[in-house]
Amino acid sequence: MTLKIKDDKPFLRDTSKMLWDGEPAHAEVKDMSPHISFAQITSDVVNSLENPRPIYWWAIAVCVFMIAVGVACEVYQYRTGLGVSNKSNTNVWGVYIASFVFWVGVSHAGTLLSALLHLTHSDWRKSVFRYAEAMTTFALMTAGLFVLVHLGRMWQVYYVMPYPNERGVWSNFQSPLVWDMFVIGTYLTCSSIFLYTGMIPDLAVFRDNIHDGWRKKLYTFLAMGWQGTDRHWRNFRVAYLTLSVYLIILAVSGHSVVSSDFAMSQQPGFHITSFPPYFVVGALYSGNAALITVFIVLRFMFRYEQYLNMDVLRKLVRLTFALAMIWTYLHLIEMATVWYGHDTAARDQLYFKATGAYAGWWWLFNFLAIVCPWVMAFRRWQTNLPVQMVLSLLLNVGMWLERWMIVAPTLGHSHYPWTFDFDQWPSFVQWGILFASFGWFALLILIFCKVFPAVSMYELKELNYARKVEAHHALVGEPATKGAH
Amino acid sequence: MSIANLLQNWSRYRDTHPYGGAKPHMGYKWAMAIDMDICTGCNACSVACYAENNLAVVGKEKFLNGKSMHWLRIERYWHDTPEPTDPLQLTAYTASGAGKHFPDQGAHFLPIMCQHCEAAPCETVCPVGATNHTQDGINSQIYNRCVGSRYCLVNCPYKVRYFNWYNYQDPATENVWPEPLNQQLNPDVTVRSKGVMEKCTFCVQRLRAVMVDARTEERLVREGEVQTACQQACMAGAISFGNMLNPDSRVGKQWIEQGVNIALDVQSKNEHVGDNTPKRGYRILENLRPYPSVMYLEQVRESSV
Amino acid sequence: MSKRHLLALFDSFDEAGEAILELRKAKFKGFDTDHDMIIKSPIEHPEFERVLGPKPVHVQWFPLFGSLVGCTFLFILVSGAQANFFEQLKGGKPIVPIPINLVITYALFMLSGVFFTVLGLFVCAGLPARRVPLYTSRVLDDQIGVLVKADEATLPAIKAIFTKHKAVEFQEEAGK
């Protein structure tokens, strides 16, 4: 038996409209059509490097402006001292640490999509996982910047690393910040390796399809002579699977260690046993919301309507809703344990959050992060692009506020009443640097999508192949067994 | 090498503070006791600390903003009285102008500095090891190792660490010691730059000087040979400081007298049978188990008697 | 006799697969079906690759080795560093706190595992690779290539089999 829709139509190059009649190529596609040829996928992705919509360049300009604001703030803070960020000896952390946790959180969705869903063979991930994985790397790079900005003497940050020196001085391996350095460093290294490894087959396609300029040299170098031989694919498959197993563990341990920055301390409101799972799920939640935002932006900007389609969006939205509900449960149970326990300092802390100086922000965050995701439960809104765009941004505002509500009111209201300090409103320096971080992250993503394949070509082809086989069997009336892996 | 070292000295590597008396510090355990019945809250100790340790005077605005550098601060607490429900009493209450304060009780006050905990929460969380437990029982702070992550301050239950938010010796901006005030800086103590954490050191510069002297004479430091700046300035003699392991030391005797054991988090001070001397010793936030080295002697008030 | 390469391009996996199966049955002289035949495809297709016969993969042993070595190394490094740095005594904790060291040991467990996985991929897959002869970009786009290396005398017979199974294009190495 040979797999051809018709005898004169080569299977992998089939573009017929027999089964999915009347479907325009680039409109509101429900799902990827099986009639896209492999060559079409290649040319769509290769072309996305060349001609994004003009708004791309406007977006780049906005990002550069945002970064400039942050750099100006940081230069001012660097020269004058951290005092200009308006913290006090009670509120020592503030926006920087909250944003650090936020960005580490955003990084987690990429790992979930690319690693966990890869292991479970959830094929719908194939069109979104590449940029999600890039988001992981870039969000971690953004988070790393907040560590630098936060430090009093960032020029001495290398003290945190354990390097051999003649004085025999080592960093303190007992500190959760050193664990952070180890685990976030490992996570960043491994996620970039994972991103790169998964991209090798696609880089080879770029190498073959782009014929001159720096791009040719770059792709030739990075593709490392990949030729798609059976030996390459066989080992690649196992290596990629192994990497994804490591990445899942890393994602979980990564945010658990970030949560231990808080949970390991004695501060009431930080010292909570359920913080690791609470942080991990919160990270997946906000990361997925960010994924939806980037999904809608890339779909428009790079004309990926065929691949970043409504079917994938619907699944992403459902996943986000499920994660939001898990997170809600963990959030409520965290408060319930504090309220039920007899640690009066922690309980006062909780009451302070709900009724004290930060109460407005606290209730806003609860509304945004708990109530708003319910919009995602309704089928009619799940594929409505404007609604999802606004909603995903709101959810991330809520999740940022959640991190800020963990840091700011908690530090202001500790064990020791004399040091209570409720009115440290972060200065423009902190807000400016937070503002810039979004520009920095978006700039990295935009550059990445212009230089590297933002959707994975070979995985799309696999998905497409499976669809072709399914469609063929539907046509000839045989059970689809072969090829649908 | 390190493995051999590790295996040979294994038991030594597993020792933890507080030792609990069975294994003392190496000759020294500096400790303090502050008698609140003698203390008048005059702030002289705080001023002496500013002078001795080159503390920056940050000014009113930054003080109100919570950026002050007072290593030793006098905390003031007022008794809150609930508003009376009876309208007649409420009128009197408002008319007295007392507001929420309880005037005849006056203020409670508490001089508080770094408690030099035996199991200090700040030490374990410092990423670079800038704050450690020294062998003479002090919680040290190494300024030129500090990177300013401020985690120690987050984890300090007393919040007695102070961060240099600005460069207070920068002639261009925040110079708090303009000419000729810089002449009064203590040459034995560093002037800290921006971005480092600092805190009470038990006047470690004085301790080290006498300890070196004592070592050249092959003895331990004697009681009374060294005083902290706050102790020296206290006109009432409310602060006693010394080597707790020295049987002659006033502070060691006070701790024993008050039945406060440095290695316990729940003191058995009220359970002594046949001992009628009132036990007034306590340590702050003992239940968090940092095992602080500063003991306070409770202030006995007329109204509570 | 000198050996030469022949690349046949197919439009579908099934045609290529049947051609390979027939080649394996044919047992040409001087043509080792296990080593002289390479498939090139734009996507991975594990079921299809079975036509080449059993081809074991050994990548998974690299991370196992790497992880164990990495975490042992880090645990010894960290504990040794602590044991030689007695000045960094932390109140309430011993100088070598084992449970705490396990946290970062775990991080290096994964880091070295990942490094060794990539190393394993490079070693086992032979990356970075030089181009084999008769490379065409079509095999990464939408065609399946079967590259054989055989004696010059047997090449026409092989080619006949490929043609029978609807190979769309041939590329041959120039004779020496």
Image (tube, rainbow, N blue to C red):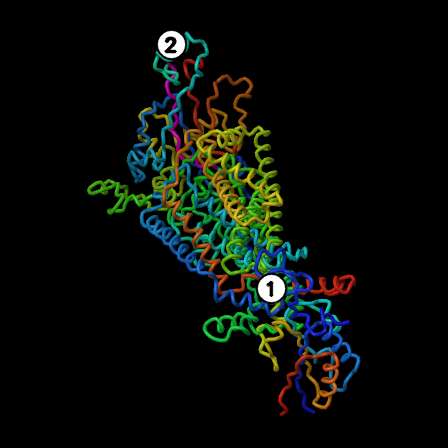
Chain of residue at mark 1: C
> Toward the viewer: C102 or B98?
B98
Instruction: Give the label, 1 or 2, closer to the camera.
Output: 2
The residue that disc 1 covers is C116
Q: Is residue A340 above or below residue A202?
A: above
* Label 2 neighbour load within 10 Å: few <14, some 14-19, many 20+: few
Inspect the image, locate mark 2, and give the three-letter code of the amino acid beneath it: Ala
Question: Residue B185, percent across and down?
Answer: 26, 41
Question: Residue B200, percent across and down?
Answer: 38, 37
- Which quarter of the image is occupied by the N terminus of chain B? bottom right
> Toward the viewer: B91 or C120?
B91
> Toward the viewer: C27 or A49?
A49
- Residue C124 seen in render: no
Magenta highlight range: B104-117
Query: At 53% across and 27% down in the image, what residue appears?
Result: B267
The residue that disc 2 covers is B92
